[in-house]
Image: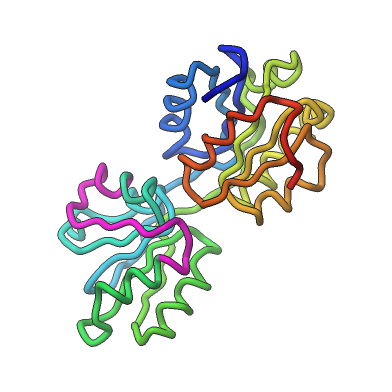
Amino acid sequence: MIRATTGAGVLITRPEPGAEDTAARIAALGLHPVLAPALVLAARDAPLPAAQAIVITSPAAPRGLPAALHGLPLFSTGPASADAARKAGFARVEGADGDAQSLAALVGRRLDPASGPILLAIGEGYGKDLAAALRARGFAVHRRVVYAAREAAGLPPDATAALRSGRVGWALFFSPRSARAAMRLIEQAGLRGAAGAIVALALSPRIASILSAWRWASILAADAPHQDRLLALLAVEPGEGRTA
């Protein structure tokens, strides 16, 4: 149960697709979403080989896949990327438990390496460990970059104003790269000092370790890499809780 004052600000550093969904969840909790996407994602055209199935690790990946592939089975890291795939038109979608290990295990249970290669559709710089895990299970893997991410040029004016006025009680961080980018943007705006009054909520311990370079009111990591578990941490009021 949320114990903070209704209207308290929650900084959302997640990029689109996904940020608006998170904002709606925050608003439904009686809190005030403050959008500050740290990364900008864009689909990238890439020649895609034939495959028996598709594997994705991000909600951004389905936007870079053509409709001709919508009939293939698609396996995703977790519920957010699975939902994005369904919205993009994929019908045969399964989500794993939120990490590469569980995704590789899911694919291993559902597919036969002898039935053909897997298309691993990822963002630039991602998916190498997952590709290795799938190959270790005997799969031929075609790793293709279908979207690219760049750091946002700056914080949105509303986010800058909310941080400057002390209206942000929590900040949500969804990936190591976006966490680093968000911290650079906040520092670039001269607002690093605002972190001292903010509870930083991380989707994983790895992200929490990146955030620990700054002094926050506290840093909390979700006990599983799911948005639901991250949002559950909003029960901690600003200034309370343990530091990761």
Question: Which residue shows up at 56% across the image and 50% down it?
Answer: 223
158 vs 210, left or right, is left
Residue 33 x/y as whole percent:
54, 22
Residue 169 x/y as whole percent:
68, 23
Question: Which residue shows up at 24% across the image and 56% down it?
Answer: 93
Q: Is residue 156 above or below residue 207?
A: above
Q: Is residue 5 above or below residue 184?
A: above
Q: Is residue 120 above or below residue 173?
A: below
In this picture the colour scheme is: rainbow
Query: Residue 36, located in which quarter of the rendered image?
Result: top right
- The span picked out in magenta is 84-102
79 vs 36, left or right, is left
The answer to if 95 sits in the magenta stretch is yes
Residue 21 x/y as whole percent:
41, 32
The answer to if 147 sits in the magenta stretch is no
- In this view, the residue in front, 11 or 146, is 11
Question: Which residue shows up at 49% across the image and 16% down it?
Answer: 30
Question: Which residue shows up at 32% across the image and 76% down it?
Answer: 108
Total labels: the figure holds 0
Residue 142 x/y as whole percent:
37, 75
